[in-house]
Each structure stands twice: as structure tokens, then as C-alpha cells.
Amino acid sequence: MNFPDNLKYTKEHEWIRVEGDTGIVGVTDFAQGELGDIVYVDINTVGESVAKDAVYGTVEAVKTVSDLFMPVDGEVLEVNSALQDKPDAVNTDPYGEGWMVKIKITNKSQLDELMSADAYKQMIGA
Amino acid sequence: MEESTNLKHTALTAVHQQLGAKMVPFAGYLMPVQYSGINAEHETVRNAVGMFDVSHMGEFIVKGDGAVDLLQRVTSNDVSKLSAGKAQYSCLPNEQGGIVDDLIVYCIDEKTFMLVVNASNIEKDWNWIKKHNSYGAVMENVSDSMSLLAIQGPKAMQTLQKLTSVKLDEIAYYHFVKGEFDGCADVIISNTGYTGAGGFEIYMDNAHAVKIWNDVLKAGEEFGIKPIGLGARDTLRLEMGFCLYGNDIDDTTSPLEAGLGWITKFTKDFVNSAALKAEKERGVAQKLCGFEMIDRGISRKDYEICTAQGEVIGRVTSGTQSPTLGKAIGLGYVKKEYAAEGTEIYVKIREKLLKAVTVKLPFLKK
């Protein structure tokens, strides 16, 4: 499993890549492996402000459905529309083509509460 | 989650772990839910051949002079139609209109039968059948000594034929042969399955399970055989509209409502047959239907089925994204006035009513 050092991680198995005031958010390699084959990503929160740890969407795997949790307070700017036709990108490229949403980070200090790649790896026992 | 230390193992648990399977608790057993991924495994069974370890299933031997009478009493199908080498899908009705379990009855000879039951119901079924055994039939629970492998897919026969002189193409659907397989005696080779992909289920003593598993994998290598987990077993059976006990049928669902009228034979008396016959005559109140989602979304067990106005008319019992059809499918009970094929229904998914349509089963047409 792969956990890039330039990302921040949450206990809900989300990652965020910070680019100035915006963040790109997705689920980790560990999460996609646990979910299995992802068949549908359902996110209807574009334009909404979503608080840290609140649900911004759901992801459907063949066997199971799981909520997606916001890593920090943010406004959802954009959903990865490519996932409509190619949801399995979350499995094959969770940190690249499999990204979920782009957000405007409204409380940057919360970033400090997130985990580094090493801390996340320790949490999942990788 | 159940403690993994309390879980039972099959003869192949270590083999699955070596193969990198994701192991999960299922019906008190530690079982492989997937190896390479559900979609890839599913496709392998539909297009080539895959092998499942389903040794968690229970097996009872019922034999002796009272065997036929006992089975006629507890099962809904007509055991008198069986002869040596034939198998029959059936169910155990309870006295409240529901189903204790669904099962396959194998006729070894006219006085010896093997019952194959769901792992989660082994103890319940055993006690139930025993309670009704006023016929002096001899019962033996051989679940812990028997392994069961399902080899399914269009290349299953070619794969298995390499390992036995039993002529597999002469075994008709729902028939079986007890013979030598892969150098092991007394293996039951049954033309049955839970996938709709064709193939065989083979029953053997635990002592032979690892050898046979490995040799079948070798024999199927040229066809791209893969080990298949319980995840794909579920998507494969659902595409065929096959019922899963605990989801689509249970202690509270009627076999008639579940579409199992074809295994409920009123040509004989059996547990609760009078009440079931009356139910048939007055008509069922609800029916198990297949449906496909029209709006984007995936239905899951226990989601509500509603009208466009949001009135609840039923509930989902199984749902998934069909790997073969590429659309979301499900089974659910709906009030009979909504059960006709082509009826628009709505499934409540995360507080939204999403449109679906009832369809004829199986979802996957031949």
C-alpha cells in the first residue's frame, strides 16, 4: 500500500492535498482496498459548506456503502465528474484520478490536527 | 465483529490466507470474501471457470426405513420424485408460514439421503428435523468432516474432466455421481451450483480437500481459473435471482411469496402444508420481485420500497451493482398489486426516492 508523504490523512481514511487555500480530497489506498470494487460515487454537496468530520458524500462498492467525511471545514468547489463513468479509478489510482472533491479550506488551522503519512500508517498497522 | 479466534476454519483456510484472500467472519466461519476483487472474480466465473470453497455449508445424512417419510414431512418438495443419483432443491417450512431453511436433498439410494443446508442454520435445521423424526430415520451430521468445492463457469467441465474418468457430460443438471476424483474415492460430483454459469459442486472428505483444490487450480490454469470468494458468489447468485437465506427468505417469509411455489408440492402432506395451501388459494399478500434501478443508486438490504408519493409498499432484501449487466439490481418484497413486471417503484436511498422498475427473473438472460 502506498501513502504519499505530501498528503495529510484522517482517521476516517481520507486524504487531503493542500494547494494554497484549496484542498483536493479523496480516500486512501487502505480505504479503497477495504471497500473493494467501487461502482458508484454519490456526492451532491457542490457549493455547500461542510464541516470537518461531516459527511460530504457516499461511495458504493459492490458489497457495501460507506460515507465520505470532510477532513477539514470547507466549501465543496468541484466534484471529480470523471468518477461518474469511471468509479473504479478510486481503486486503481486513489491519490490521482480517483480524487473525490476539490474544496475551499475555510479553517486552515485544522490541517495541523491531521495525520502525517507515517502517523496514518501506524494507525492502520501498515 | 466476531472474534476471529472463535471462528471455525475449513480444511482450506490456510490455503486461502496464502493466496492473499481477504478473510471475513461468515456464519461462524472464517471465510474468503474476495481474492483479486469481486468484479474480476465474477467475470472469471461468467466467462471461464472459478472455484469456491463453500465447506461451511452443512451436510446431514438421513437414512433407513423412515428416511423418506421424515423427508416428506419436513421438506416442501416431493422426495418421491427422487431416485439414486438425483438431487432436488427444497425448503423446510416452519409452522408459522415461514422457512426454517432452504436446502438440496441428494438421493444416494432409496433409503439414504444427504441434505445440504446453510452454514448459519446447521444447528437450527438439525434440531428441527430431529424434532420431527418420529419415523425412526437415522440422522448423522457430517458437516465437520466434509468439504465442498464449487467449480463454476463455462470451462468447469473441461477443467474437472482432466481429473476423473467419470463422464461429466453424462451428468444431467441436478444429478450427481459418487465416484473417484483426483485419485480420491467416494467424491460426490454434482451438476448443481449457485451461479447460473454452469459447472459442478464436489463433496469430499476433509482429508482430500487441499489436494483436490490444488489439482483443480492446476487443471484449470489453461482456462484462467481463479479462486472465487463469497463476495462474487453473492453477485453471481443475485444476477440469477436465486434466493439467499437470511436475506430473501427467512423464518418469516412464505415460500409462496418468495416465488418458491415450484418446490412447494401439495401432492403430499408436510409441515404447515394446510396453511400454505390456504395461502395459495386466497393469494399471497406480497411477492418477492426483481427490480432494476432506473435512477442512479444502489439498493441494499432493508431499504424501503415506496410509491412515487413515498408510501411504503415493501422492502429490499438483496441489492448490488450487477457486474455483468453494469446496472444496479435488487430483490425485494412488494405488495402484490405492485408486483407485476414493468411496475415503477421507488427505493428510498439516503432519504431520496429513486426510481426503479420490476423485471422478470433472472436478471441475466441466457
Image: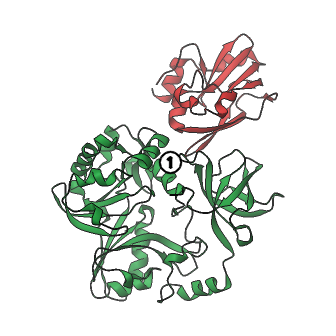
Provide the residue designation for mark 1: B1
Residue found at x 66% / y 28%: A82
Disc 1 secondary structure class: loop
Where does residue A115 sit, x and y in percent of width and height?
59, 20
Residue found at x 70% / y 44%: B296
Can residue B86 be seen by looking at this rendering? yes
Residue found at x 32% / y 84%: B67
Q: For this view, does B341 lie left or right of residue B139?
A: right
Chain the render paints green = B
Q: Amino acid at mark 1?
A: Met
Chain the render paints red = A
Q: For this view, does B326 lie left or right of residue B82?
A: right
Q: Residues within 10 Å of mark 1 (few under 14, many from 20)?
A: few
Where does residue B263 sit, x and y in percent of width and height?
49, 76
Q: In this view, which residue lies farthest toward the right?
A: B309
Q: Nearer the viewer, residue B300 or A53?
A: B300
